[in-house]
């Protein structure tokens, strides 16, 4: 049978793996402000990627425009998204260690 710390760690790992973009793991921890900031941050990253990426449908693909037309500002959301992904992986490993080191 799983102990209380193990159940809590598994719940947090599940919320992190499924709802990382919505900040569900932070809402579960009782950090409402951080949850809303996470939701806003990922929304800005994905929204800016959709806005800055030049592919806009079938007409764009038919004209076969060059990838040199990319907006140089796309580096900013890509970098922030990469940093966020690293933080998510780091938190996942921390939760896995917490699960392993749960007291008997």
Image: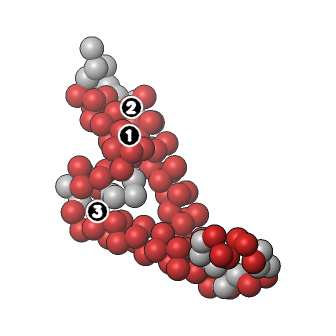
Q: Would you identify the image quadrant in which residue 74 lies?
A: bottom right
Left or right: residue 6 compared with residue 4: right
Asked whether the beta carbons under mark 1 and mark 2 sit within 8 Å of each other, the answer is yes
Q: The residue tagged with tag 3: helix, strand or loop?
A: helix
| Residue lying at 38% horizontally and 31% vertically, measured from the top left | 99
x and y percentages locating residue 98 in the rendered image = 39, 36
State the residue position of label 1. 13
Residue under label 2? 99
Disc 3 to disc 2, how far (Cα)? 23 Å
Q: Residues within 10 Å of mark 2 (few under 14, many from 20)?
A: some
In-image side of 69 versus 3 (left or right) = right
Q: Residue at x 46, y 44 (%)?
A: 92
Q: SS of the residue at dot 1? A: helix
Whether residue 99 is visible: yes
Q: Position of residue 38 (x, y in %)?
A: 36, 66
- For mark 3, what is the residue? 35
Q: CA distance from mark 1 to mark 2?
A: 9 Å
Q: In whole angstroms, how far apart are the C-alphas of marks 1 and 3? A: 16 Å
Dot in front, 1 or 2: 1
Q: Nearer the viewer, mark 3 or mark 2?
A: 3
At horizontal 33% and vertical 58% (from top left) the residue drawn is 23
Q: Earlier in the sequence, mark 1 or mark 2?
A: 1
Q: Quadrant of the C terminus?
A: top left
Measured as percent of width and height from the top left, residue 63 is found at 75, 77
């Amino acid at each position: 049978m799983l102990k209380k710390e193990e159940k809590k760690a598994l719940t947090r790992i599940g919320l992190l793996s499924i709802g990382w973009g919505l900040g569900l793991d932070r809402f579960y921890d009782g950090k409402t402000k951080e949850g809303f900031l996470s939701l806003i941050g990922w929304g800005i990253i994905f929204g800016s990627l959709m806005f800055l990426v030049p592919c806009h449908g079938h007409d764009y693909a038919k004209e076969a425009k060059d990838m040199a037309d990319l907006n140089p500002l796309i580096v900013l959301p890509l970098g922030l998204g990469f940093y966020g992904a690293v933080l998510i992986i780091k938190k996942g490993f921390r939760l896995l260690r917490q699960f392993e080191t749960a007291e008997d």
